[in-house]
Amino acid sequence: MYTRPSTLIISSIIALCSITGIAQARSDSTVKDPVLDRPLTPISGSTALGGYAELNSHYRSDHGVIEGFTFEFRRFNIFLYSAISKHVRFFSELEFEHGTEEIALETAQLDIEVTPAAILRGGIILVPLGRFNQNHDSPKWDFIERPLVSTEIIPSTFSEVGAGIHGQFEFGSNFLNYEVYAVNGLQEQLLIGPEGRTHLASGKSEEFFAEDNNGSPAITGKLTSYIGESIELGVSGYVGAYNSYLLEGEEVQPRRDLVIAAIDGEFHISDLTVQAEAAIATIDVPPSLTDVASRRQQGAFVELTHPITTFALPLERTIALTGGLRADYIDLNAGRFSTSGDVIYDDRLSLTVSLAGRTSASTVVKLNYSHDWVRDILGNPSQASAIRAGVASYF
Amino acid sequence: MSLRSLGISLAALLSLSCDALMTSPPNPEDTLAEPIEELTTTQLQLHLQGDEQFAKVFTAAEGLGPVFVSTSCQSCHVGDGKGHALTTLTRFGRYDGEIWNALEHLGGPQLQSRALPGFDPEVIPAEATGVARFMPPAVSGLGYLEAVTDDEILRYADPDDRDGDGISGRVHLIDPPEYFLLRPGRSLIDGRAIGRFGFKAASVDLLHQTAKAYREDMGVTSDFEMLDVPRHASDLVADPEASAAIVQSVVFYLRTLKTPPRRGQTSPGVLRGEQLFADAGCTSCHRPSIVTGPSDIAAISNREIHPYTDVLLHDMGPELDDGYTEGAAETREWRTTPLWGIGLASHSQGGTPRYLHDGRASSLREAIRFHGGEAAASRDRFNAMSSHEQEALLEFLESL
């Protein structure tokens, strides 16, 4: 008997809710939550403000064509937080990308804490997929570009309107966090995006902050384990219908699902920090788009950072330098052509080295060099490289 | 190391090695996607604008479909080179008596094999008696071919084989679309124009070919071709989905692509192969030199070019008879395919070359073997050559 993945996840929600009744929940309400792990400045009563800005410069070469030097004011994000009462919190993030080219309400969520193990959350939420999406603030990262898997497979910043529950369990010095939400989900524009291939980010639509396209919520969730101070492991997923298969209540085409599964982690080995994320997306593609649209996309990144040294600055300040290396790989159309049986390529491997300087936890100056090896859908190769410098800072 | 010395070192390193760290451009001898060198700055700017439009991917919101084959010009003509199986077109029709019927009321002549969600892709109707598959050709150098005068093409035509060489090429006369402009060197013959683009020479100029491609390949209507493929309900995007300016921009891009580069043309093997190519009679159709006429683009005006085509229809025999045709061409007739750039075919096909109109040949040797009809004698001369001679001839073809 076939059981829909969403049914399994809903069953898991019920099971988790049951556990909250029998497990020993934390009582101090300091639930680890990457969405709320932002520096904020109180402005009035229980309300606090914050945000970050990001300025970059690029010198790029794509297949030998040097595009020259350019500045980019990539993001200006504003946080608003309010502890409405002891157990009710509101957080929002408003993003201005490239000035006012794109303005998006990335987060606007209300948390009602029943216990630390059961916090109800609703609104525009950051989908708990992988590691990066909920940890996407530029000042947190030593690399200017976001990981490929975190933008192409998990379409960060991936926000959805929905509701669900999250919480934390304590097991001695270890913690287990969970999140499960029902959200409106991505739409069928993901099948063919602006680059002529399946592009999950093209399935995002702010129209869906008002109404779902098919009346069938997607389910997303994550389990994160914190093992001591040095290990964090996450398993996450998303499943839901993406196409408008219902029109005026009539089923006008077969329901088609998108499933994304991800694992992620952060490890600390002495001063070395390792962050990694891998994701696989399976798309139920209509036969009319076979080979053009991807049935499977997958990718991963591994990032190593290590402190190098600390320099003294005037006025008794210091700057801590960190070196880093990131390896990225994405396969945007995994499988073989249905017509010829030949391998479909359409993949990209990227290596980036970084040098980052921090005068405080809030501000980072970055210098990156990346080299990409690209194969188009047929395997025709090309390469790209870039030198990037930038600064990102919370305020 | 102090911070100052680190900063100075980094700055020096970057200033010295910025370009060294960047990827190198491909060897011009190995690439097709480059503009003609002699373009004026204005023309180069227009060319680059056209390049952007050539690469533009259409989405459903921008008019793609509802039925289509591909999403952009570039996805068929990767790197301006020869296409591949993924975007190979299927075309169909039938003979009603002696009249070719393109079965437009059934979605013909081209099968739109893909469809947006909620729409059904086309299937070949039972009424079709002829079906052919067309692998997209390379597009570099097309501006030069467009600039060849009608008189130059007619000079090589010999429909009745009066010279008795067994080659009887003829022009394909086409009813031109309303938007066809008579440029210098072009004329109408009994109200029809000489077709010169497409495997059956069924398009009279690059605008004709491009506007048809927008409509039939991508399902994108334009000021030139206003209606979606008629068998299907249109999408809800207002027509035209591509303006005349966009289509003309792509046409300008095509007109100003350089001719395919030669490689190793002075090597002894290539020179020997070139002679053998002529000795076998291949140059009767694959003409090495042809002259362009006057053009509004000085760089392509009155130039001798080496496309290895005569732009004429030839009977290629039963070996290449798919039972499909266009216009007044017979099903066995094909326009002589330009051979320039053939040595770079695999560069846009993932390293695995496919030859002939539908990619049925996986090597040049195999492609030659498929030549029949008027080309049968040349094929037989090739088969009679020693293996060294054959290799030299193939080396010459690879140099094109």
Image: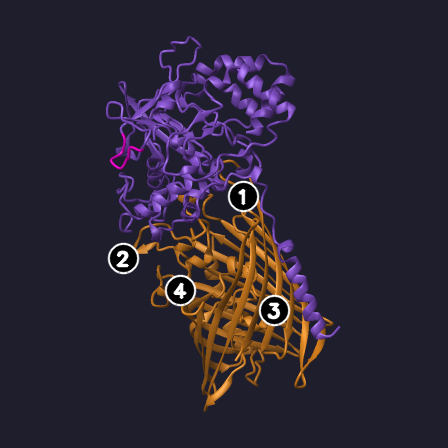
**Could you confirm whether marks 3 and 4 are on the same chain?**
yes
* Residue in the image at 42% along x and 23% along y: B310
Residue A373 can be seen in this image? yes
The residue that mark 3 highlights is: A366
The residue that mark 2 highlights is: A248
Chain drawn in purple = B
Q: Secondary structure at mark 1?
A: loop
Instruction: Report the amino acid beneath label 2.
Output: Glu
**Could you confirm whether marks 1 and 3 are on the same chain?**
yes
Instruction: Report the amino acid beneath label 4.
Output: Asn
Chain letter of the residue beneath label 4 in the structure image: A
Instruction: Report the amino acid beneath label 3.
Output: Lys
Q: Marks 1 and 4: CB-CB under 8 Å?
A: no
Chain drawn in orange = A
Q: Marks 1 and 3: CB-CB under 8 Å?
A: no
Report the span colored magenta. B176-183
Q: Percent from the top left, x then y, of residue B384?
A: 58, 12
Q: Secondary structure at mark 4?
A: loop
Q: Percent from the top left, x then y, of residue A99?
A: 43, 69
Instruction: Report the amino acid beneath label 1.
Output: Ile
The residue that mark 4 highlights is: A184
The mark that comes first in sequence, 2 or 3, is 2
